[in-house]
Image (cartoon, rainbow, N blue to C red):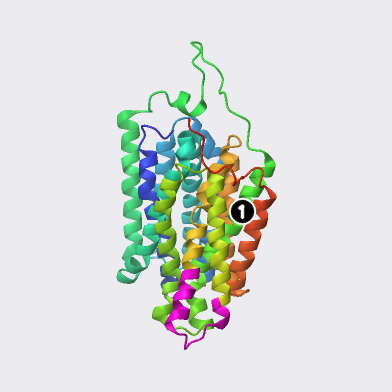
Amino acid sequence: MGYGTGVLRAYYAYYALRGLTVGIAGTASLFIARRANVHQNLLVAARGLGLILGPLVTSRAIGRTVWCGESQLGVATALLLKGFFALAIPNAGSPVVLYPAFFMIGLAMSVLDTMSLFLVTSVVKGSGGAMLSLYDVCYGIGGMVAPFITVAMPDSCWYVLAAFDILIAVNLVWRRFARGKPRDWKTKLRKVGSSPIGSSPMLSAAVPARILRAGIAFTFVSQIASTSVSAWGFTFASQHLGLPDTVAALIPSTFYLASTVARFGITGVSMRLIPSAIIWMSLLFFVSGALLFHTLAGIISATARDLETYILLIGVALMGVGVCPHHSFMLVAMAQHGDLHPREHGWYTAGTSLGATSGMVLPSLVSLPNVEVASAIALALILNSRIRDFPWRDQFKLES
């Protein structure tokens, strides 16, 4: 349960910590690979495998934990697991330790992600998109700060992550045993009627399979698009376009900055627009940015003029603005058609993680601009195929 437990508030700190973890793992994995003579791509793959398998394996346990009103202990356990394996990484010099450690960190993160989505869509309901957007803002801030922390303290950064994990976990455990379960948590979460003798949970119908498939496919492609830019933007600009490193570094940083800033505006707009309308508008930004990025990447060179570089960055910024609400608001749009149970949340999180993992690999096989344009086309086709389920015409919410 979320209300009265501090879990939903703790997730603001966790998502900032998640951004730090992703950024530190991505940057520090290069240092670890050199030090321990292991393959960097296998470290990334180990964490990605944990992110993918975690929701599929633990979704039933997550559901039981939340339905029993023990979300505090569930979140604390996952944080302690994540912190324990983060402590093992700095001194590990063997792949026998490193690969399982990265896998378990990914698995713990997937459990925390799935539980947060389940709690928000079950408890917060209508304003869930705004809360998830704020979570994403915290994630973006953590992601922007992570490289600087990693460079400043390449080994100690893992101790910083573990310390924050443990502090948040201890706070949740203290709240659980000091205050107990929140009042009326069964009524709030299970929607139990007010019958004096009690009644069974009055849950609405489950989300139709066609909507679930479309939502998972959409977030899968969206994650490919966003991860490709953030993970390969610098390499593409430096090696393929021949831009100086200082200019190439602006590609991923501009993408993250635009995405983070846009979330503040989307949080306010979400009070007036239905989730599917926000997704449609964001898709227009992403398609425009992908086409602009593809066009400029085809004509720009190492001697590019400032104007060409600025236009290229505008395309990247438009893509960042475009993808920022996809993961959160697609989930809320799906939840408007029925209840999303833990298993559905597990599949959604697994699809998200699989897309992110694919985005780390695909640009090494296909040109980054082609990946972005193909993603834009796929997203438009998926959304258009379910336009009746995810409408864009009736944009303004009805007054209650």
> Residue 306: within the magenta?
yes
- Residue occupying image coordinates x 37% and y 47%: 12
What kind of element bears circle 1? helix
24 with respect to 179 (left or right): right
For residue 231, above or below residue 340: below
Q: Is residue 35 left or right of residue 396?
A: left
Indicate whether residue 259 is drawn in magenta: no
Judged by its main secondary structure, the magenta piece is helix
x%, y% of residue 241?
52, 82
Question: Is residue 81 shown to the viewer in this render?
Answer: no
The residue positioned 36% from the left and 44% from the top of the image is: 10
Which residue is drawn at the image coordinates 57% and 52% (left, top)?
280
User: Left of 213 or right of it: where is 11?
Assistant: left
Q: Position of residue 37 (x, y in %)?
A: 47, 75
Q: Percent from the top left, x then y, of residue 86?
A: 40, 58
Residue assigned mark 1: 218
Q: How many marks?
A: 1
Q: Residue lying at the far bottom in this picture: please name it.
A: 303
Residues in magenta, as a range: 296-315
Along the line of sight, which residue is nearer the eye, 138 or 345?
Answer: 138
